[in-house]
């Protein structure tokens, strides 16, 4: 998965594809040609499609394995507990789509209708879309070559793709061609890091107003180092940051409720980082082995262990995200409400 080059001049710059930082970037030739600076007509199409979606939230992490997809799934579960709230979860972690497993939807298929792809519905008010639904099995690999993540040449199972298997950009398709309907919340589970998937989703949704990003970390400095890069990325692309969630923040024994530090916050953890960077710390979620068991079974931990410290932490964080969204509605939404 390609990282955005340090010092990327941006597609609109005269140095696009020509600067020293562009060397080795898979999109160098595209940027140098000037085609990257041409507005993609899909941006306006996606803006029109997203008019029925009130709030759009990206879930980011600097590293893999910090519980980002688990958090995305439980954010969706928690919001959808109100049957009057319409929620959708979009998984754009193209190379490692875990949302179908976590949501208990493995083996489900995406259906096409006259109005586009139909999400797979877990509940009447909770729809899910993932590249995992497009694979023939959970063990199939999706291999992408450079910018093909956006030109969308998918090689399922590791085999070579024929010219006939090329599709329009997968991320673009998910945003433009899925029949999302009227939504209160669209949650986008992204890959770890700051790769070109992140640039694409921000670019495509910018005109449609993104409420902001929730950034997931764990307490140890190794994770926080990469989170700082993620925060820098958000600032560069002018993506608002709703706040930071510290996952695996201590271990609370389900039997005795005693707390132990499995990943010691040697530099103060997310709390000190947020103080230094003047960012909201949305909350800390302790380790609980039942979270992993619930995910493996495709069930909501919020239902399986509703009174556990981790579930209570999830609910507090979800409430803070809802409050942020309600305070930062775009003017168009306020006029139409």
Image (cartoon, grey):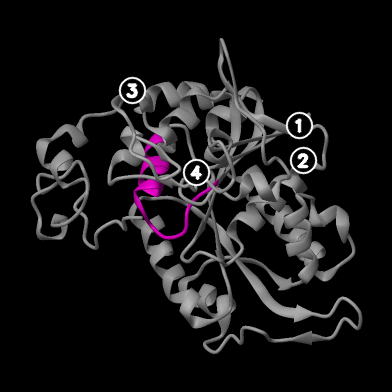
Q: Which mark is residue 92?
A: 4
Callout 4: helix, strand or loop? loop
Q: Which residue is mark 3?
A: 164
Task: Tell me residue 322's x, y (percent).
Answer: 69, 48
Task: Tell me residue 211's x, y (percent).
Answer: 54, 44
Q: What residue is rendered at 20% in x and 53% in y?
A: 25
Q: Which residue is mark 2?
A: 80
Report if the CB atoms under discs 1 and 3 are less than 8 Å apart.
Answer: no
The reply, left or right, for residue 44 in relation to residue 312 is left
The C terminus lies in quadrant:
top right
Q: Nearer the viewer, residue 13 or 255?
A: 255
Callout 3: helix, strand or loop? helix
Q: Which residue is mark 1?
A: 125
- Location of residue 29 by image quarter: top left
How packed is label 4: few (under 14 Cα within 10 Å), some, or many (20 or more)? many
Callout 1: helix, strand or loop? loop
How packed is label 2: few (under 14 Cα within 10 Å), some, or many (20 or more)? many
Whichever of callouts 1 and 3 sits on the residue coming sooner in the sequence is 1
């Amino acid at each position: 998965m390609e990282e955005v080059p340090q010092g990327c001049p941006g597609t609109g710059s005269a140095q696009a594809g020509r600067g020293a930082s562009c060397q080795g970037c898979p999109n160098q030739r595209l940027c140098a040609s000037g085609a990257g600076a041409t507005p993609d007509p899909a941006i306006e199409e996606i803006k029109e499609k997203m008019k029925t979606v009130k709030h759009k939230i990206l879930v980011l992490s600097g590293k893999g394995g910090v519980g980002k997809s688990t958090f995305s799934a439980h954010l969706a579960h928690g919001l959808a507990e109100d049957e009057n709230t319409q929620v959708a979860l979009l998984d754009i972690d193209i190379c490692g789509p875990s949302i179908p497993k976590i949501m208990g939807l493995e083996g489900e298929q995406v259906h096409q209708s006259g109005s586009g792809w139909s999400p797979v519905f877990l509940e009447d008010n909770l729809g899910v879309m993932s590249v995992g639904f497009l694979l023939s099995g959970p063990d199939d690999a999706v291999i992408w070559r450079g910018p093909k993540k956006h030109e969308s040449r998918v090689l399922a199972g590791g085999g070579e793709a024929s010219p006939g298997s090329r599709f329009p950009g997968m991320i673009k398709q998910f945003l433009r061609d899925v029949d999302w309907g009227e939504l209160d919340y669209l949650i986008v589970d992204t890959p770890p890091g700051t790769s070109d998937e992140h640039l694409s989703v921000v670019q495509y949704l910018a005109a449609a107003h993104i409420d902001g990003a929730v950034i997931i970390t764990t307490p140890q400095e190794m994770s926080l180092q990469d989170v700082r890069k993620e925060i820098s990325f958000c600032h560069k692309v002018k993506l608002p940051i709703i706040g930071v969630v510290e996952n695996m923040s201590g271990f609370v024994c389900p039997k005795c409720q005693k707390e132990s530090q499995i990943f010691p916050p040697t530099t103060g953890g997310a709390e000190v980082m947020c103080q230094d960077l003047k960012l909201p710390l949305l909350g800390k979620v302790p380790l609980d082995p039942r979270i992993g068991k619930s995910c493996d079974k495709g069930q909501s931990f919020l239902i399986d262990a509703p009174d556990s410290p981790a579930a209570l932490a999830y609910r507090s964080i979800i409430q803070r995200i809802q409050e942020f969204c309600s305070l930062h509605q775009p003017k168009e939404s306020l006029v139409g409400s």
